[in-house]
Image (cartoon, helix red, strand yellow):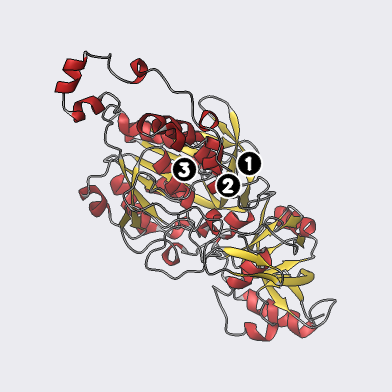
Amino acid sequence: MPDACSLILDDGTVFTGTWFGRKPPAAADLEGKSVGLRGAGEVVFNTAMSGYHEVLTDSSYTGQMVAMTYPHIGNYGDLDQWSEAGPEKGRSNPEVKPTALIVRKVYRGPVPEGRMSLDRFLLLHDTPGITGIDTRALTLKLRDEGSRSGVIISHSADDGPSDEELKASLSFLSGYPVMEGQNLVDGVGTLERQEGEFSLGEGTGAYELTGAGNRLAKGRPGRAAKPEAGSAGSQPAQTVSQAAAQSASQAAAQTVSQPAATAQPASQAAQTAPPASGAQAQPAQTSPPAQPTSQTAPPAQPVSKSAAPAQPASQTAAQPAATAQTASQPPAQPAAPQVALIDYGIKANIIREMQAAGARVVLYPSTAGAEEILEANHDAVLLSNGPGDPGVLRQQAEVISRLIGKIPVFGICLGHQLVAQAIGAETYKMKFGHHGVNHPVRDERTTKTFVTSQNHGFAVDEESLPSDAQVWFRNANDGSVEGLILENRRVLTTQFHPESAPGPHDGRWIFSRFLEVIDKE
């Protein structure tokens, strides 16, 4: 069979199936290869039922092969707008961050217009996938024994690799570095300071489906038109839930400053955004036919509710036109807080959520110094997620230690672990980590439990925390630390991903909670 391949673990376990995406290397091609080989890395399992595109574009999976526990993957295709790759300015990293995808059954049928099949998406991004293996058995093995290094090889025999191929693969894996001790942050994230508009969800282009199969389109069908720089709508692409949350206030503002005929309903605004992660994706839709004014905008309000009381005609005529307009203008708003965001391999939705919460974001590379950030007079610092072992990032932890106590600090995932190290605590490698969108977390202050999105293989050692560090969140399954509060030093952290993408939105309130720390200064 020409597409036969096998996943080989470092203990000699073999799972034989077929490949999709890019063809995996042959065993003979492994000699002389090392870290960074597509199709090799630490094997981890992800328990999400959907959101595979966001998983594939998450920099935290750098150096890993991801096995999806849900058996049927790829049925709604791939679209750039769902990408979680951050604005890696100055780099030419692949959009797909894991080195391989492992599934029970890949979907090979048609996908909605404007999207690309998963098979084609992985091929475009030089990433192999393996399908047709027992992912349940693989997951149980990783859960019981811990994450392992592995490699996917192609071979001609249908029933698995030959003895020589197996021997060559195990020889390669014997010298493959484990995740513990690896600094992977140096290879991801932006290399330059950035502010203003960010390129989020751009990817490599939109896709279209033709009768002969999938191919790259020259344009970007199905994508909302990008507003001009500096316009009121010049914001990054948002999720459906974000668009829905803001549509009501936007519609209200439009009815004051625009004729009723130009107002758009919230449902129409949501059509240009990507579907929420975990939901069944739908084909791109065109604008609906024009509706009567009474259906597309709220009823006109009496002038007395939106403007000053009417004045005699003689007085109105004597006033400048600008004076008449001031009655309908909203009151002046306070300046948005400016947040320095240190990029260790950031997910795009962290930037979107910070902007949605009202912050101005300035992105810094992972090599930024404390003095550079403090001299810029930001209101707070946010530390992003990222790949690899936090224990080797001593320079980054030292920078954070100089920031704590001088400016509010918020850490997410790797950022949470680096904060712990900066205050004197230690981190450790977990047996198989937390990867998925259904991990329960308990708020230790309210005792309420909610569902979170997670992706981490390291955790904070609670016994090593200083006395002023309170455990804010705790994993309800294994009791591991999921968040910290240092009130006197204005520090908040979460091990899970409050920005979701993919996953539930239960933790989005944490972004507003962080900004409240700034307001209390």
State left or right for residue 153 relative to residue 236. right
Q: CA distance from mark 3 to mark 1?
A: 24 Å
* Residue depth check, mark 2 versus mark 3: number of the one nearer the observer: 2
| SS type, badge 1 | strand
For the N terminus, the image quarter is bottom right
> What is the three-letter code of the residue carrying label 1?
His
- Residue at the location (57% across, 81% down)? 33
Q: Which mark is residue 307?
A: none
Q: Nearer the viewer, residue 154 or 338?
A: 338
- Residue at the location (42% across, 40% down)? 356
Instruction: Name the residue beneath numbered marker 1.
Output: 439
Residue 481's x, y, as percent? 53, 40
- Whether residue 55 is visible, yes or no, is yes
Q: CA distance from mark 1 to mark 2?
A: 7 Å
> What is the three-letter code of the residue carrying label 3?
Ser
Q: Residues within 10 Å of mark 3 (few under 14, many from 20)?
A: some
Query: Is 400 situated above or below 216?
Result: above
Q: Nearer the viewer, residue 270 or 126?
A: 270
Instruction: Name the residue beneath numbered marker 2.
Output: 454
